[in-house]
Image: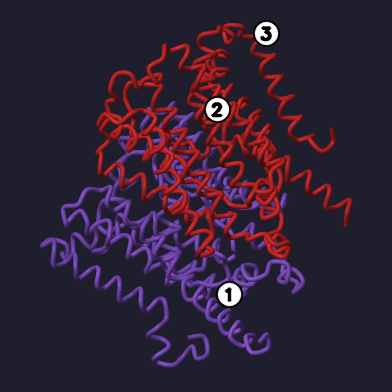
Chain colours: A red, B purple
């Protein structure tokens, strides 16, 4: 229990919020809005898992929002050209992986700090997209929305895909060698190198995986509506980093797991509907999000400080 | 390059000299493309539009010198602009008092960053990412996303839009901030300690310097200057909205890195930052004269940042690669 104290406390907070909503705003539990909420968060969950891996590897990626927009628009244009949906999905994942590889080369190859690199790619990608597309929506052909299924079936499919990916990634990080590499590099890159792991290569692959996950998530978001919004994904980086940090992923690397991220994301996702149901204005969402990030890092800081004192 | 800092040849190769040449070439190019680019009016226009980003870049320099970063300055500019309008219109303070109050808020907000970074030893990156969201969110919450403060008196707008003694009225403020930061970084022991912290924070502590206090100082300073920038921004735009200064943190960081300050801390100069600000200001303005859309300027700023970063780390990479190859060559006879 002590090992997973952080994750359990997030789950506890989530349970408390859900309970409070059940008592004060039972309208929150109507099946239809709840299903829509979960569907909306399914792509975010996938990106949050990727961000968690990046942070565990002691890096950060704030360009995911821009990557998301670029992938959705490119894949949307390809789908509008009449390409089969599966091909569009694969291309979106490929484009994402390519953009991730670009970050990876700059961070792992040239040893540049990931915060500045991804800050630069974030702006470059977003502005390039705005320049090329001038904010025009992409109209998707019939049969793309909900992948040709009925809406409810499409929603459940997306949620199922996100959950399966979560389980697979959680398993991989816990039990596969490649997953343990990520923790090793994030804890101490030099020690990992001496143990025979190639830290720079691991870092590079993590950025590629991050990009591929963003590509998949972008497509999963695009099929939810008849049009692709070129502004989709703005603010995604903050939302997912917040989910990871709240879920117990240490920003200093090497610590955290994806189940905690899952709980953290659900907790953050409940804020916005909770605000509406509790009749607080929605304009507070961003401020509350920022406050929750700060609260989570302060809690981590206090804990590590206490531990540091007891050890030394 | 490192062996003789004062030789003529070495000074030609210095980062600032190269950047100065780049800025000059940039100016000449845009001057040949846009007929009105080189006029005095346009030069003042460039200065007017560079003042806020310039001030943020100036205070970002000591922060990056210590190995830190402040992502929240743009959001703080927005929050301060809103509060300035609020103090004046809704609380009914006279403008000078509202300005003082705003600067106080800026100091407090910088203090929040400083407290979290120094007391709890949290990484500046994540702390200021949190306050980046918090400050912008507060600005949006206070204005409910739509409220705009306008109708400032002409005497106030003078600061942002008119000339004083023949130069843009906000230029003197910028010059004072620039001289202040330059003296702080290059002519005081504080500046030395910022570099020392950037190289080795633990070593600096053992050398008897109070690292926490120095760090707190640079983040509070950033908050204060962000507030001042909010005031000149409001005066220039004639209005204050919740989205004021969005993305300014990126331009400021770009200017600093472009100016030759190492993102890892320890190395860098304030005059380099000023050149970086000039490069970005001229680029943004010149592209308008070259009839390019605004997005291109944003895109090029991002590309410029990547380029500046890679060019700074490339020689180091090459050196390590060469060293590795030489050791492997040296080893070869032993093994065979």
Q: Could you give the CA–CA distance between mark 1 and mark 3, rounded to whole angstroms?
A: 61 Å
Marks 1 and 3 belong to one chain: no
Q: Is residue B31 left or right of residue B246?
A: left
Query: Could you classify mark 1 by the number of other residues whose Cα lies within 10 Å: few (under 14), some (14-19), or many (20 or more)?
Result: few
Residue B93, by quadrant, is top left
> Element type at marker 3?
helix
Q: Could you give the CA–CA distance between mark 2 and mark 1, rounded to whole angstroms?
A: 56 Å
Q: Is residue A266 above or below residue B86?
A: above
Place of residue B175 in the rendered image (x, y in percent of width and height, measured from the top left) = 39, 65
Reading the image, the residue beneath label 1 is: B188
Q: Is residue B161 left or right of residue B253?
A: left
Place of residue B196 in the rendered image (x, y in percent of width and height, measured from the top left) = 64, 72
Chain of the residue under the numbered disc 3 shown in the image? A
Which residue shows up at 67% across the image and 48% down it? B116
> Element type at marker 2?
helix
Which residue shows up at 72% across the image and 51% down it? B119
Chain of the residue under the numbered disc 1 shown in the image? B
Q: Residue furthest left?
A: B35
Q: Is residue A187 left or right of residue A132?
A: right
Chain of the residue under the numbered disc 2 shown in the image? A
Place of residue A281 in the rendered image (x, y in percent of width and height, measured from the top left) = 50, 20
Which residue shows up at 63% across the image and 51% down it? A57
**Disc 1 to disc 3: CB gap under 8 Å:** no
Reading the image, the residue beneath label 3 is: A23
* Residue A233 in view, yes or no: yes
Closer to viewer: mark 1 or mark 3: 3
Q: Is residue B172 above or below residue B7?
A: above
Of callouts 3 and 2, which one flags the residue occurring earlier in the amino acid sequence? Answer: 3
Closer to viewer: mark 2 or mark 1: 2
Reading the image, the residue beneath label 2 is: A162
Quarter of the image where the N terminus of chain A is located: top right
> Element type at marker 1?
loop
């Amino acid at each position: 229990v002590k090992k997973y104290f952080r994750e359990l406390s997030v789950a506890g907070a989530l349970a408390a919020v859900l309970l409070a909503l059940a008592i004060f705003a039972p309208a929150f539990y109507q099946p239809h809005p709840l299903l829509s909420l979960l569907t909306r968060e399914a792509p975010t969950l996938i990106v949050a898992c990727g961000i968690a891996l990046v942070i565990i590897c002691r890096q950060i990626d704030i360009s995911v929002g821009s990557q998301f927009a670029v992938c959705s628009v490119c894949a949307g244009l390809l789908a509008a050209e009449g390409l089969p949906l599966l091909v569009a999905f694969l291309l979106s994942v490929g484009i994402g992986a390519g953009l991730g590889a670009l970050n990876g080369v700059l961070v792992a190859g040239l040893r540049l700090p990931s915060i500045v690199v991804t800050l630069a790619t974030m702006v470059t990608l977003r502005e390039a997209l705005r320049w090329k597309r001038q904010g025009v929506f992409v109209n998707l052909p019939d049969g793309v929305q909900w992948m040709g299924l009925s809406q409810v079936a499409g929603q459940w499919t997306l949620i199922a895909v996100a959950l399966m990916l979560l389980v697979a990634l959680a398993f991989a990080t816990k039990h596969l060698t490649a997953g343990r590499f990520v923790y090793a590099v994030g804890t101490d890159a030099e020690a990992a190198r001496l143990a025979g792991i190639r830290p720079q290569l691991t870092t590079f692959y993590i950025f590629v995986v991050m990009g591929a996950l963003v590509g998949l998530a972008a497509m999963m978001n695009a099929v939810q509506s008849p049009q692709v919004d070129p502004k989709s994904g703005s603010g995604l980086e903050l939302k997912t980093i917040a989910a990871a940090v709240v879920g117990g992923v240490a920003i200093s690397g090497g610590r955290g797991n994806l189940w905690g991220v899952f709980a953290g994301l659900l907790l953050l996702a409940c804020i916005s509907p909770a605000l509406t149901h509790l009749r607080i204005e929605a304009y507070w969402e961003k401020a509350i999000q920022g406050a929750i990030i700060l609260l989570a890092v302060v809690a981590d800081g206090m804990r590590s400080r206490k531990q540091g004192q007891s050890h030394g | 390059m490192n062996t003789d800092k004062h030789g003529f040849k070495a000074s030609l190769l210095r980062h600032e000299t190269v950047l100065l040449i780049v800025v000059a070439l940039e100016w000449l190019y845009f001057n040949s493309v846009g007929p009105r680019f080189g006029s005095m009016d346009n030069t003042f226009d460039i200065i007017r539009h560079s003042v806020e980003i310039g001030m943020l870049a100036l205070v970002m320099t000591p922060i990056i010198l210590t190995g830190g970063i402040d992502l929240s300055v743009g959001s703080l500019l927005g929050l301060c602009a809103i509060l300035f309008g609020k103090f004046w219109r809704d609380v009914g303070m006279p403008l000078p008092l509202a300005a003082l109050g705003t600067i106080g808020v800026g100091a407090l907000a910088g203090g929040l960053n400083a407290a979290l970074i120094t007391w709890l030893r949290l990484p500046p990156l994540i702390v200021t990412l949190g306050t980046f969201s918090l400050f912008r969110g507060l600005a949006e919450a206070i204005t409910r996303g739509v409220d705009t403060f306008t109708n400032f008196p002409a005497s106030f707008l003078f600061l942002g839009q008119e000339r004083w003694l023949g130069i843009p009225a906000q230029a003197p403020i910028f010059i004072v901030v620039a001289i202040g930061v330059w003296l702080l970084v290059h002519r005081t022991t504080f500046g030395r300690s910022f570099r020392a912290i950037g190289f080795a924070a633990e070593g600096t502590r053992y050398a008897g310097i109070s690292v926490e206090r120095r760090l707190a100082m640079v983040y509070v300073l950033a908050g204060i200057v962000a507030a001042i920038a909010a005031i000149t921004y409001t005066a220039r735009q004639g209005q204050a909205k919740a989205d004021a200064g969005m993305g300014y943190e990126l331009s400021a960081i770009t200017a600093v890195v472009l100016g030759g300050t190492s993102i890892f801390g320890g190395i860098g100069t304030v005059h380099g930052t000023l050149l970086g600000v000039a490069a970005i200001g001229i680029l943004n303005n010149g592209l308008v004269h070259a009839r390019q859309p605004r997005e291109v300027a944003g895109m090029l700023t991002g590309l410029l940042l990547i380029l500046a970063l890679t060019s700074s780390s490339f020689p180091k990479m090459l050196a390590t690669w060469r060293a590795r190859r030489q050791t492997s060559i040296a080893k070869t006879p032993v093994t065979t």
